[in-house]
Image: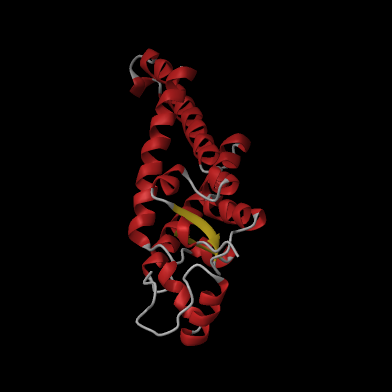
Amino acid sequence: MNDNYNLPNVPQEGTQEHDEYMRNQFGDDYELGYRVGFGRRFGAFIIDFVFNTIIGVIVMGITGVFEEIIKIENPLNNLEALSVIMQDSSLIAVIIGLIYYSTEVLFGASVGKMLLSIKIASSNRKEANTSQLLNRYLIKHANSIFSVLGILLSLEFLQGISSIILVIILIGFLFTLGVKRLALHDMITNTAVYYKENIKNY
């Protein structure tokens, strides 16, 4: 952000005095300029997708999933066996994803966010508390949670719910294109994504 905004006697940015001054001048909306929008957040998503996929492939190899698939002769004549293997691999992939993104609860950022120097915080630009981060994680990954439950409990309707939630989450992510730069899960949990250096430490 600009250090002086072409205004006289502006307190040093990064201080509580500057925060109060800007809020008095422009209202709470001045905070919106600090939020990270769609582009960089999508970049973090791509990085996370690549890392998550690599980890998934390694785990699938170690657990012998690929070997089991190769062993199946005439897959079209062994659809039941293939279906069991694919279900197991789907369960492994979803669980890996849930574990991978748990860093957003522990550190306020996924690996992709860390590499791009952005972090989840409260919508007022202060550090998010554990409750906010956990609730955000549960909402953002609700489709994966329902998917795991559906596979483990063999309840197909939970898989259907998972698909519906996934569509809602994807549409909700597009809300970051708006002025407030908030995804649906941010709106619900009162969080936002900022550059790490712009998160308040006062």
| Whether residue 100 is situated above or below residue 39 in the rendered picture | above
**Residue nearer the viewer, 136 or 30:** 30
| Whether residue 26 is situated above or below residue 106 in the rendered picture | below
Q: Is residue 107 visible?
A: yes
Rendered location of residue 158, percent (x, y): 57, 47
Give the left or right position of residue 43, taking residue 191 as reference: left
| Residue under the point 40% across and 27% down | 57
Q: Residue furthest right?
A: 131
**Residue nearer the viewer, 138 or 65:** 138
Using the rendered view, name the quadrant where residue 20 is placed: bottom right
Q: Is residue 181 visible?
A: no
Q: Quadrant of the N terminus?
A: bottom left
Give the left or right position of residue 167, taking residue 15 as reference: left
Using the rendered view, name the quadrant where residue 4 is placed: bottom left
| Residue under the point 38% across and 31% down | 54
| Residue under the point 47% across and 72% down | 12
| Whether residue 8 is situated above or below residue 182 in the rendered picture | below
Q: How many marks?
A: 0
Using the rendered view, name the quadrant where residue 123 is placed: bottom right
Q: Quadrant of the C terminus?
A: bottom right
| Residue under the point 47% across and 73% down | 31
Give the left or right position of residue 85, taking residue 129 as reference: left
**Residue nearer the viewer, 22 or 172:** 22
| Whether residue 185 is situated above or below residue 94 in the rendered picture | below
**Residue nearer the viewer, 128 or 57:** 128
Q: Residue furthest front?
A: 9
Rendered location of residue 157, percent (x, y): 56, 48
Rendered location of residue 196, percent (x, y): 47, 56
Rendered location of residue 137, percent (x, y): 57, 51
